[in-house]
Amino acid sequence: MENPSLLSFIEYLQIEKNCSRYTIEHYTQDINEFLLFMSEQGIKNLQVVEYFDARLFLTKLYEKNLSKRSVARKTSCLRSFYKFMMREEIVAENPFALVSLPKKDQMLPRFMYEEELNKLFSSLDKDTPLGLRDSAILELLYATGIRVSECCEIKMQDIDFSMGTILIHGKGKKDRYAPLGGFAKDAVQSYIKEAREVLHKARNKTHSYLFVNFRGDPLTPRGVRYILSGLIKRATTDGSLHPHMLRHSFATHLLNNGADIRTVQELLGHSKISSTQIYTHVTKDQLRKVYNASHPRA
């Protein structure tokens, strides 16, 4: 049985905060993890949790070798949860209010070089409905830089082939239009014309989501990541490549070729330009490498 405070918090996230279902899933998982910790520690209810308990929970997280980013996310989630419960007068204090968030490791996003991308695109099998679908997913992600979760939310009516744009439903219910490049446009049209109906009607399913699985149901983010991971493994021996690098590559290649950062921010759907600026560090690093390798007196 779900905790009633958690159910109220989820309702608050859905109605007042307009959070996406993926954000709500993460919040629910993190809070349930804390509820399990409470049970293991013999803590009876949320009202009696103290600062010491919050610190002990963080210690347990570190013992699991979680990244600083994951620990910070879980801490922030529980801080928000208790802040909500204080507003609703469910609890008197927020035990996570004074818990400091761990400083996140400053990791530069890894991107794929053009040679790696060419190998990936050339490895595609376009002779089957699933192959055409996978090709469309790959081309679309690289052409637009959208998140995997955003890719799964695209519906048929969101695509305007005449204008060459797609309506993207981003984080926090923020919609934006993404331009559809020529390669992606051709791949998506081929998939819709030759593959989608085959997959869609195989199980007599009726929905308007663009990408479907072999059962005809809408593809999930987990399904897309599984597909992309398989494509990457078949195309390259580099085990460090992962699906999110398509988004990193999109941003990096645009900046390397002269796009201004505000445009890239808009295309990525970043609410803050600081989120986009990390890609300028990547491009500066790339420029330095090219300079050192090319200049006679570098």
Image: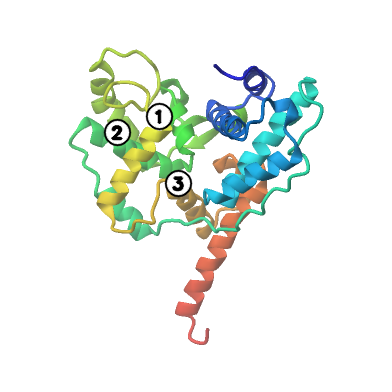
- Give the total number of marks visible in the rendering: 3
Residue 135 appears in view: yes
Q: What label sits on residue 204 in the rendered view? A: none
Q: Quadrant of residue 2?
A: top right
| Circle 3 SS class | loop
| Circle 1 SS class | loop
Q: CA distance from mark 3 to mark 1?
A: 15 Å
- Give the percent coordinates (x, y) of residue 32: 57, 29
Viewed as shown, does residue 205 lie left or right of 5? left
Q: Amino acid at mark 3?
A: His
Q: Amino acid at mark 2?
A: Arg
Q: Quadrant of residue 185?
A: top left
- The mark that comes first in sequence, 1 or 2, is 2
Viewed as shown, does residue 118 lie left or right of 220? left
Viewed as shown, does residue 50 lie left or right of 198? right
- Give the percent coordinates (x, y) of residue 102: 67, 51
Q: CA distance from mark 3 to mark 2?
A: 18 Å
Q: Amino acid at mark 1?
A: Thr
- The mark that comes first in sequence, 3 or 2, is 2
In the picture of the structure, the residue carrying the numbered disc 2 is 133
- Where's the N terminus, which quadrant? top right
Q: What label sits on residue 244 in the rendered view? A: 3
